Structures are given as structure tokens and as C-alpha cells.
Amino acid sequence: MFTNKLVPVLLLFFVFSAGGNAVDESLKLSNLLGEWVATDVSLYSSAALTANRGDSVTSSWKPSELLSTLALAQFKLRKNKLNFGPQLEVEGPELVLDGKAIQVKVKWKGIKYATSEDIIGVFSCYDEACSNSALTERSPIQFKNVHGKKELSFTILIRSDSPAYELVYMGGTKHFVEILAVSDPIVIPDSLWEIPQHLRLSLVGDEIDKMRVMWTEPSRCFHKVKRAPPVVYWGTVSKAYSHKTTPMAVYTYDRTELCERDFHPAGSSGFSSPGFQFEAILSNLKPETVYYYAISGRKEEFSFLSPPALGTATPSKMIVMGDVGQSMFPIDESLQHSFDNDEHGEVQAPKVLDSITRIVQNEKISLVNHIGDISYATGQLALWDNFLYEIEPVASKLSWMVGIGNHEMGWQKSDMAGSDSLGECGVPYAAFFPYARLNPIKNQLGKLHFVKHYPMSRSQALENEALWNPFYSYKYGNVHVIMMSTEHTFEPGSVQHRWIQNELACVNRTVTPWVLFLGHRPMYVSDKYPAPVTLLLQKYIDPLLFQHSVDVAIWGHHHSYQRPKCKLFQGQCHEKGTLHIVSGLGGFAHTEFGSNSSDIWAVRNNKVWGVSVLDFKNSTHLNITFVEHEDDTIIDQVWVTK
């Protein structure tokens, strides 16, 4: 892990530092974002996108014009005061990736004793001068080896709360780093890093006439100046919007809310400010209607298809996959902190997301279910920006529904104790996907909920059942979907077990003839290293699935695709059981199979990556395919009938 290169000593003892109960303060908008004036619905043209945003008018800029006029002076690297010793010379930057990133070239001189382990890292800064945090207190967001090279090129994503970057030449060894040279700050113009980013849609529970829109904006914009609130403009006619909606909630966190800061990076060297995550609800949507929308301060227009009415004959078609992650390596060959692929990140994840984009373009896909191990940031929180950047092309068009996994949640006080999140303990996940819980924030006209923290420990959750509880359900067309958390206790008598039992008992098969059950860690799996959670799921959850005739259950965690020969109950074929599928090939490196459970499996594949596509054609026929990510080849196909 690259973290060790910047932290010479790891204290190998446990100091629990997660804090506090949930804070859900309803703040008047005048306190945070300026005055909010309620406005009746009227017609807004595309020109209105630049209104109500103070000094953040960006809808008309062109990258070439921006660089040649406004930005060039601000982009100029500050001259290094030192003229002796090791030096870094930076050329650029240039805008790339449709204005969402910059590209710089770096050369070095004066390095007398270079080794094969020397690297140049990219560090994000909290201010334009890169002055308020020591390099030894931070980790690079990406890096490259310099051995045998004379210059390097970096593509650096523009992040909402990172107004500048600096490049650092590091020698020494992997465990004891020596900082040899630091570039002057590469300053990002306000007009670039203030642009709203990371648009993502999600369903609003069972309210099919609503759609949730979330996006990221810099927190410092609203602390520096009094600004009007952001606005979502939307309607059924492209660029002629009949409605506008202001956010109902904003989510964020700081390093003090992360866990085990004394020996894990999330709240220490790996911390990166997430900005503000805005949430707006579009209401009174007509079923199966194309809506166009745009966010004030951003020039692009987006669109989505509203959900169908429940109980209709309209087929539902959705993607299910787990264990995705992100990587900058396919973009510029940068390395990063990661558990897999020798610090290359999840190099297959961008290809899987490209495959999803093609599938969405060619087929009528309703939504995506991402069942845990979302970004694999695992304590290096800037990598969440990488992931949200990667999914925006799809997530801005259709609902991206998530479930929590061990790499979002695992810490020493979680129900499934471990260290797999490296200190995140669910906090970033809850801020980026706040709907993915039992009792999400409700809309209240005239107020903005400011949410900073969710409780993570079992004792906190048991004190108040209305707290976080990251499990939920939704209905779409002819399907009732239940998303459990395998990271939180589900034994009889627990909040989650009671909820699953009640949710299954309330299924109306006349309205939603299909029941799809989702979770991260699998109930049935061929695994070289079996986990205790598997047996607990079989003991406590399998009887509920059998009792209520759940049709299909899909899991991730094991980085493979697995499908049994038959429906299962208590590990045996049973005609009234549930079809269990493992679909954990979203991008992470493959996992080995076990040798003692192959007799029940019809298909086991850990050679490719891809996603499962579920086509609920009518009330009696479901077609499930597994689509490989390179050329969208169907690797496996099965029909479920009733």
C-alpha cells in the first residue's frame, strides 16, 4: 500500500475515535446559502441556467477561450524562490476531458542519487497557496515512477474542494520517504473548480412520480461569499424548462467524523474534503416520460426517463453488479493507493462502465443496482471523486441504486468488525448516497437540511431505530427490490431482520409479481476462503426468502460470476427455493474459487469482468444474462419462469 511511503511509522494498536450521534440540523437557507425566495412555477429558458448564481456564471465558456484569457494568469505557476538543489519544472496546464481535468508535464533536475523506487506524486491542496497542511500529513492522489524517464505527464481531475495541486518528487524507500523537490502550486481558476460535478440520479423509494438529483459543489464557495442557492431547471422540452427546484438537503463530513484516525488514513493522511453534496427532489412527474434538466452553474443539459406506473405491463430491465472501483491508469497511466493490481487501481472498472454506457444506449435499461464495494477509495478519499467522475455519464441519465459493502463500512466497531474501509466506516458512502437507508431525509418546504454525520456503531443504532440503518427497498414497474446490508447485524430481533420480514410480508404480487433481493456478501458462493457471514445468511435470511418465495437473490463480494444449477434452499436444490447469483465482476481483481462446493454450480467464471442484466419481460418470464465488458458478449443466460 502506498500509504506507508508517506507515513514512516504505523502505530499498530487500536484507538477508537469515531464520534457523536447523528447531526441533522434544519437550517434556514439564509444561514448557509443566502436568501431563498419561493417562486411559482413558470417557464425558464436555457439562458436561465446562468441566473441566481452570483459570480459563478459558467454556462458560456469555452476551454480554449478560458485558457487564453481569464485562466492563463491564474494557471501560471508561481516561481520557485530556490535556485539551487533538486528542482521540478512544470509545463502547462491544459484543459482535457471536456474541461473536467488538467494535464501537466513535469521535468526534474538536480537529483543526484535517483533509485528505481523514486516517484512523483500529485497532492491536492486546501487553498491556492498549498500552505495549510504539511506534505507529511497528506498522501498523493496519484503518482508515477520516474525510473528511466526524463519527464512525466499527469492528467489531474478538477475537484470541488481542491483549488490547487502540487507535484512532489519523493525518493528514499517505500517505508521511509524522502521529499526531494516540490513544485509551485498549480492554481485552478475559481470558474473551473466551482462548476457543479458528479451528477447522479436515484429513485425516491416507492414514490414513482419523483426523481432525486444529487451533485457536488465546493463547500468553500458558500463559506466565502453569500451566494444564491443552486437550482435544478427541468421540464419535458429540451432547453425550455417549465420548472425549477432548489435543494432540500446538503451532506458533507470532515476528518473528525471518520474512524480510527490514529492508525488509518481516511481521517488523517488520506483525507480529502468532499465538498457539499446537494440533493433535490423533482416531483409530480408523469410516468414513462422523458425529462430534461440542468444544474445552475453548469452548461450541459441532461435527461432521464421517469419510472413507469406500478403494476403495468411495461417490462423492467436493470443492471446488477458489485465490486467496481476506479482507476486513473487507463487515462494517464498514473498509479494510486489500491489493494489490487500492484497499485494500478481497478483498471477494468472504466471498461465495465464503458460497457454499461453501451448497453444503456442500445437497450432500454431502467436503472443500475451497485451492490457494495463502490469506489474502493478505502481511506484515500480523493478517489471517491475519481469514481463519481467515472459514473456520471450513466448516473446522470438513470438511477444509480447502491448497497453498502465491507470496503465502505468495515472498522473495529462495526457489526462485521474489520479494517476493510481503512477508517471510512460508512461516512463518505452515507454522504454521497444518503437515500440508501431506511429513513432518508424528507423534503420540507423552505428549509435546507444540513447533515454532517450518521451513527455507525451498533450501540448507537440500537439506541434509535430511526438512525442510519443502510438498508432499504423500492419498487420499479413489475419488480419489488429489497437491498439489505450484510455489514450490519441481521440476526432475529435486530432492526434489519424485523424490517426484512415485514418488507417481504408486504409484497403485493398483483402489483409487483417479481421480488429481487440484493446484498453484498453472498449467501451461497464457491470461495477458497469461506466467510462466517455466509453461514449466518443461510441461517437467518434464507428461511425468510423461502417463506416469502423470493424469486432471485444477487450478491457481490466474491470477484467472480457464479450461478447454480437450480434454485436453492439451505444449500440444496429446491423447486420453491431462490435462484442465487454472484455478480462481483465490476472491476476489482479476480477471486479464487473453492474446491468443495462445485457440485451445485452450473457456471463459475473469474476470467472476465462484466455485469448482470435482468429483463423482467412480464409477470411470468425473467431473462438474466451476464454481459462481458470487452465487447458486450453474453457469457451466460438463464430464464426464470413461474
Image: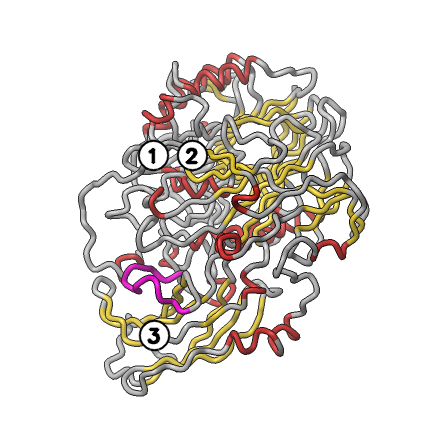
Residue at x-position 27% and y-position 43%? 260
Residue 555 position, x and y percent, is 48, 33
Residue 432 position, x and y percent, is 50, 43
- Residue range of the region highlighted in magenta in the rendering: 129-142
* Few, some or many residues within 10 Å of mark 3 (<14, 14–19, 20+): some
Q: Is residue 312 magenta?
A: no
Name the kind of residue labelled 2 in the image. Answer: Val
Residue on which disc 3 sits: 182
The residue sitting at the bottom extreme is 83
Q: Is residue 313 left or right of residue 323?
A: right
Name the kind of residue labelled 1 in the image. Answer: Gly
Name the kind of residue labelled 3 in the image. Answer: Val
Q: Are marks 2 and 3 in contact (CB under 8 Å)?
A: no
**Residue 575 visible:** no
Residue at x-position 68% and y-position 37%? 282
> In front: mark 2 or mark 3?
2
Q: Are marks 1 and 2 in contact (CB under 8 Å)?
A: yes
Residue 228 position, x and y percent, is 62, 50
Give whichever of discs 1 and 3 has the lower sequence position. 1
> In front: mark 1 or mark 3?
1
**Residue 205 visible:** yes
